[in-house]
Amino acid sequence: MSHHDSKSASPMQVATGDRAILPEGARTIPIYVMGKRYEVPETLTIMKAMEYAGFKFLRGAGCRGGICGACPTVYRKEGDYKLYFGLACQTVVEPNMYLAQIPFYPANRAKYDIEAISPVAETVHALYPELFRCVACNNCTKACPMGVEVLDYISAIKQGDLARAAHLSFDCIQCGMCASRCMGELPQYHVAQLVRRIYGKYIQPRAAHLEKRVVEIESGKYDAMLDALQKMSHEELEKLYKEREREPDMAPPGTWMPEDTQYL
Amino acid sequence: MKISYYPGCTLKTKARNLEDAAVASMAALGVDFQELERWNCCGAVHSLADDDLIHHVAPVRDLVRAMDQGSDKVVTLCSMCYNTLARANLLMRQDEVKRKTINDFMSEEKDYHGEVEVLHFLNFLRDHVGFDKVRERVKVPLNGLKVATYYGCTLVRPGNVAIEPPADRKLMAEFLEAIWASPVDFADATTCCGSYQVLANPDAALDVAARILESATRAGAEAVVLSCPLCEYSLARKQDELLQKNKISKDVPVFYFTQLLAAALGLGSEACRFDLSPRCSVELLKSKNYPIDAAVVGV
Amino acid sequence: MGYTPEMLELIKRVEATRPARVEMARRGENFPALSLEERAVVLEAFHPDYQKEGRRPVKVGPDKGLVLPDEIATMLESRSMIRPDKVDLSHVDFDTDVLIVGAGGGGTSAALLASEAGVKVLMVTKLRHGDANTMMAEGGIQGATQECDSPFYHYLDTIGGGHFTNQPDLVAALSHDAPQSIAWLESLGMMFNKLPDGRLQVRHFGGSSRKRMHSAGDMTGAEIMRVLRDEARNRSDRITTLEFCPAVELILDEEGKCAGAILYNMETREFFIARAKAVVIATGGNGRLHIKGFATTNHYGATMDGVVMSYRAGVGTTCLPSTQYHPTGVAYPEQNVGLLITEKVRGLGAHVLNIDGEQFCFPLEPRDVESAELIKEAVEKKKAVITPTGRVGLWLDSPMIDLLHGEGTVRKELPAKFIQFARHGIDISKHPMLVYPTLHYQNGGIAINANCETVIPGLYSAGECTGGVHGENRLMGNSLQDVITFGRRAGVSAAAYVKKGVELKKLTLDHVAKYEKELKDAGIENPMIAPVLLPDYSTDEVAARRKMEAMQESE
Ligand SMILES: Cc1cc2nc3c(=O)[nH]c(=O)nc-3n(C[C@H](O)[C@H](O)[C@H](O)COP(=O)(O)OP(=O)(O)OC[C@H]3O[C@@H](n4cnc5c(N)ncnc54)[C@H](O)[C@@H]3O)c2cc1C
Ligand code: FES
């Protein structure tokens, strides 16, 4: 189980893919995965350290890049009462850390019809009455591996400020750690998702130029142009390609027009 | 001195008329009245039993936020928020053992020992703005408006957080005088509005609301002022049902005290928010022919 | 933890050359860019796509003879994990109208549109719903939404960027639908970056004539994926989603129509027969095959399953030999290896340097050329830095950015990267980053037409697993648009096909048996078993011990 003699590779051998190999003299440290001790190279993430130790993930690994929320991990350090939370794919192993992954945490989710709901805070309150069970203990915020101010967005929702809640919760990757620690048994991340969609659909102003463009497309305005392009030879296309005017970098969106407007 | 304003959730949803009027009035009076940057529920929706420490975490966190922001005072409008914050503050000042427990639990925040003072808006008006200043700035004196001063429970109970000695009540009266209205004290001024009973015992809640309203009218009041969304729910929003069930004989205009302040300061409809108050309240003001802009009373 | 003392020592060499390099940049001078001929030479010698070594003709299947990277050819010359003669196809576990394989952006869009057309949808996916490349896209999504732009220019930019190798009907479909796709996302409640009046914020990108890149913070793909997933969950009465339940083989009927798939519950290791009148393959990319040992930006399940399954059933590919390498993937710290470092860093003036702190290439060559130059410096010149975990890397001198544009520019212009490195104790405004090319995108794949149809009736495909939309080179922001546009089209086409009335005949796996015979005839002994589903990252030591155990059990 442990590899005290770290002789896996000569110094010029090169690691491939996501598999880590140890250069001469690399140090290893002990970690405890669900109570069992493994010696792993320092500097690895929890995810790669566990793979190094021989685990093959089924649950608990997704993007491997800190954005999908598949790998939340809870750990303690030796002699420290505190609970720590991190993403296994982003958190570096420390000597004597005791860890367990929590790849799934059940949470109540309310179904709704985004087309039919009324875009006000009361809608959210009615779908998630448990919001008012929040005692502001802040364990959600402490558990968030993305540093989202969970309590603050929950408070904003109770206060009816959906725009603020949408922005405060934007970095949420829906790993569920907030819900796992909640005294009031709230499903914070589902509530936040609902709020962001209400914000995106109803509160943020709609893009008028987009609506207009969609109408133009549906009316068939560009069909002939696209047909012609598809029939063009490589040379004809290359000529047009080279002749393109480039929108100036510094022109704010919607302010510049090209000289040639026949294809707009 | 730096003062922060703590609104409370209800004021941001169901009681906008309480808040909008106050915020606009402060601007009109030239008072710097900044909302706390970060705040959560005051904790009023949690049980008020004080042996259950977790329920103090919410209000204490709000006080820590105020402290973090460098404020030494935090002002509330809602009586319930005032009560919850003030009681938690008292606990943090007085009970060393519980203070330590709560501070230890909230180890991610700075330790708190009651550094911030919790003020109700009425105290704030009297002590930091000054009723004289208010009186000077009044543009629409509410002459002859007879208003019952309803305190309910949370402004005056328990005694150690009361905004003034309950037996010697005069804050609301002084406030009304400052806007040239006529205060009417009445027997049920500190009777609980019954909102604690709405779910468990709805009929009892209606009865007590009816008693308060009748008692106010009997004392000669034309309207009632209050400072709590729960009281407003019981005394104003329940009036249709009270009338229907013949528990009161006629509807009674009800205002948040901040709405009358805003009206007296001559502020517009976005400040007074009479659109969110019972119809009869608006009628009353109209009938008085005060030089209030017609738009303000929603014509 | 930051850089090791040894690495900090090496950084001193970078710092030593920096003042002169900054002066040079201030004078507007650059390391000379390559001529077209020189480019061809370095590409030929070092770009993985151009090298003879590591590539060979595939020996079987519809594209027999096509020269592919070894890893891809081997994957296509694989055999099924199921034994076709042992499967009882008369026992159907799931019966549905449309089966969608892969719940990333493409699959989920297809599921939503098919369900809107009123058919029953079963969506199966390998990991969790949304554990997908779509989730990882940071930069943005293209679409000609602004007045100065039009589908015409979107078409031109795309086909020019793809060196005119793209499939024209697909490019036309992409540029035609793009604004509609964006409007659809807006109507679902996606939080786009907008100006206060609602106008969509747009930016330029490599190869654009108009600002056409729309984004949602620096997590555009995640925002798209979250919203689509949430909507699919709202429609759980019409869309059944099975997680950790990949498809491992397609099922046809006696007439050669696609008729479903065999599913594999990875947790219980059970197989299920899913019968479907139409199947949509949307299984995403192949980064996790680690072609030539390269690290990748892709998610854990990007193993080319869809191409493997449909190839076996007789569907050929388009542009499959071409792979996109991003020149600057993270090489250190280990926890970020393979992750993307946006082109913007070089755009802001950062130089690429070798172990001695010397420049060796123009930093803004086209992506494929830039990648080849880095590989050359590491492999041929052996001038790369070796990390504590045995990786090679070259310096990307980010501190130059603050020197050139003023203190605080790095923080302001690259907030996500700044935080990502700061988490691991590296301040990229003070210390350079270590980078190496990383496998980014599967340019080619399953051959489809603009309705997402394959040559097999009832089999549709959309997204990164398909080929032709981007030709041999994909422009940034076109693949998110690809998955929405073609995901939606696949959903519509599949539903329409089902609604016309599909009568499935007896189910069969004959194509699998036939393919195995072809393997045998081609002399392929011990073909690998694919789809591989997940990569294996255990060390050689662990793998060796596992084998020993197995031998003891069986012998
Ligand atoms: C780091 C990164 C950044 C990017 N940035 C951008 C960008 O800024 N702009 C842009 O346009 N594009 C970008 N791309 C590319 C783009 O995100 C992808 O090409 C696109 O999202 C692919 O979508 P998809 O639906 O085809 O595949 P995916 O989103 O990968 O979804 C495929 C799904 O199928 C599942 N699956 C695989 N095999 C099976 C099986 N056998 N059975 C069932 N399910 C299976 C997978 O697990 C996955 O969930 C980026 C990609 C990466 C990796
Ligand atoms: S694997 Fe996606 S966040 Fe870690």
Image (spheres, rainbow, N blue to C red):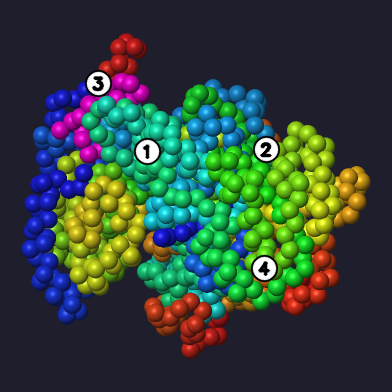
The subunit letter for the residue under badge 4 reads B
Residue type at mark 2?
Thr
**Distance from Cα at disc 2 to Cα at disc 4:** 73 Å
Q: Work out which residue is located at the far bottom of the displayed protein and give it.
A: A259
Q: Is residue B242 visible?
A: yes
Labelled pair 3, 4 in contact (Cβ < 8 Å) = no
Query: SS for tag 4?
Result: loop
Q: Which residue corresponds to mark 4?
A: B179
**Distance from Cα at disc 3 to Cα at disc 4:** 81 Å
Q: Residues within 10 Å of mark 3 (few under 14, many from 20)?
A: few
In the rendered image, residue A40 lying in the magenta stretch gets the answer yes
Whichever of callouts 1 and 4 sits on the residue coming sooner in the sequence is 1
Q: Is residue C232 depicted above or below A115 in this figure?
A: above
Labelled pair 1, 3 in contact (Cβ < 8 Å) = no
Q: Which residue corresponds to mark 3?
A: A1
Q: Return the mark for residue C96.
A: 2
Most common SS among magenta residues: strand
Residue at figure coordinates x 86%, y 47% from the top left: B242
Question: In the figure, residue C334 lies in which quadrant?
Answer: top left
Q: Which residue corresponds to mark 1?
A: B107
Q: Residues within 10 Å of mark 1 (few under 14, many from 20)?
A: few
Residue type at mark 1?
Ser
Query: Where in the figure is residue B160, as x and y percent of width and height?
Result: 54, 41
Report the side of B54 relative to C256 (left or right). Answer: left
Query: SS for tag 3?
Result: loop
The subunit letter for the residue under badge 3 reads A
Query: Where in the figure is residue B6, as x and y percent of width and height?
Result: 53, 54
Labelled pair 3, 2 in contact (Cβ < 8 Å) = no
Residue type at mark 3?
Met
